[in-house]
Amino acid sequence: MKLLNLSLTAVILTLLASCASSPYGTKVKEPFQGNAYESNNRFWRASGKGTSSQDNIARGKADIEAKAQLAGQVNTTMKQVADQYLGQTENENAADVADKFQSLVRQIMNTNLADLRKMDEKKFYNEKANEYTVFIAYEIKKNAMLRFMKKQAKVDKTIDERQRETIEKIVDQELEKADAADKAEDKDE
């Protein structure tokens, strides 16, 4: 009877061990994961990770990775907005306006991420490997970025008055959505 119990226990432990292992390896929980660090109706958010034997280099790598992710999100969103405008507009100037709009977005992304805020930063040191790992999380408030874009459109000399008005209309529609999300969030708090 004891032998049967021992065998049954061994089988159960073997089954549990095989269920726990994954062909991908062990899952690692890194900082800045989950809803609080994901983009939503109010914010664009991104995090970056950098590793180096020098802490300032690890931090620089994390910083660049997070900002690149943010720029990509903003650019993708604005491209979708411009494409929606193209689909909704039937005038011959629509493609030109969409190109100018996307060009404006690229200029802004290359020079400045408006209202960039660091949400958090964590640094770890691995003595065995003699290296630092830094995690950084940033966010940009959507309505602040959109207002910045609108301001930039007003001073851009390559955009004529009709295109400027159209771009401002596009940005205003997106601002309404972002402001509505802010108001809804404020009511919940």
Image (cartoon, rainbow, N blue to C red):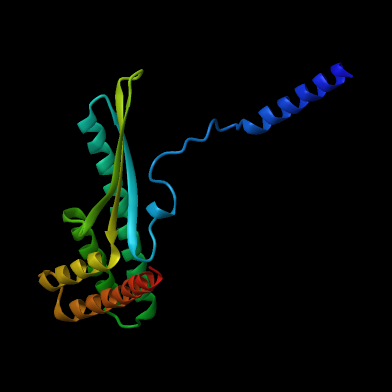
Depicted 70 relative to depicted 43: above or below: above
Residue 170, placed above or below residue 28 = below
In the rendered view of the protein, which quadrant contains the N terminus? top right
Quadrant including the C terminus = bottom left
When the figure is inspected, residue 104 is found, relative to residue 28, above or below; the finding is: below
Q: Nearer the viewer, residue 188 or 63?
A: 188
In percent of width and height, residue 25 lies at 54, 30
- Residue 91 figure quarter: bottom left
76 to the left or right of 63: right
Question: Does residue 50 appear left or right of residue 18 in this picture?
Answer: left
| Position of residue 106 measured from the top left corner of the image (x, y, whole percent) | 23, 59
Q: Position of residue 79 (x, y in %)?
A: 33, 64
Dividing the picture into quadrants, the one containing residue 179 is: bottom left
| Most foreground residue, 32 or 164 | 32
- Name the residue located 42 percent from the left edge and 46 percent from the top edge: 33
Position of residue 139 measured from the top left corner of the image (x, y, whole percent): 29, 55
Residue shown at the point (38%, 52%) measured from the top left:
37
Question: What residue appears at the point 34 percent right and 20 percent down from the top-left corner?
Answer: 129
Front in this rendered view, residue 45 or 99 = 45
Residue pictured at 62% horizontal, 30% vertical = 21
